[in-house]
Amino acid sequence: MSSMHETTELPQAAAGRQVFSPLEVYWAAFYEWRKRAMLRAELIELSDRELIDIGISRAEIDYVTSTQGIDPRGAV
């Protein structure tokens, strides 16, 4: 007994336009918040010497984690 499965590509609703549901917007915001919380926790665990090596002080951790453009390459 064999079965074949085909994949079909769904057409885009409108070229260049994305429609997000409220749940997707909420999930994206939650995911971004979670990434920033994990970054903040990692930075807090570093010693003062390690923080100086990467160019921030302990007092700047909250600012760094709340800034939208943490890394211009997109990596966090």
Image: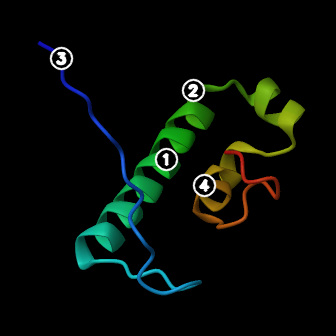
Q: Is residue 41 above or below residue 47?
A: below
Q: Residue furthest top?
A: 1
Q: Amino acid at mark 3?
A: Ser
At 41% from the left and 49% from the top, the residue drawn is: 34
> How far is the residue under mark 3 from the one under mark 2?
55 Å
Q: Nearer the viewer, mark 3 or mark 2?
A: 3
> How far is the residue under mark 4 from the one under mark 1?
9 Å
Q: Looking at the rendered structure, which numbered label has been put on residue 2? A: 3
Q: Which residue has dot 4 on it?
A: 65
Quarter containing the N terminus: top left
Q: Amino acid at mark 4?
A: Thr
Q: Is residue 23 above or below residue 71?
A: below
Which is nearer the N-term, disc 2 or disc 1? 1
Q: Amino acid at mark 1?
A: Lys
Q: Nearer the viewer, mark 4 or mark 2?
A: 4
Q: Is residue 53 left or right of residue 7?
A: right
Q: Nearer the viewer, mark 4 or mark 3?
A: 3
At 56% from the left and 84% from the top, the residue drawn is: 15
Q: Is residue 56 left or right of residue 28?
A: right
Q: Position of residue 75 (x, y in %)?
A: 71, 46
Assign a secondary structure to mark 4. Answer: helix
Q: Nearer the viewer, mark 2 or mark 1?
A: 1
Q: Nearer the viewer, mark 1 or mark 3?
A: 3
Foreground pick, 50 / 25: 25
Q: Is residue 51 left or right of residue 33?
A: right
Q: Which residue has dot 2 on it?
A: 45
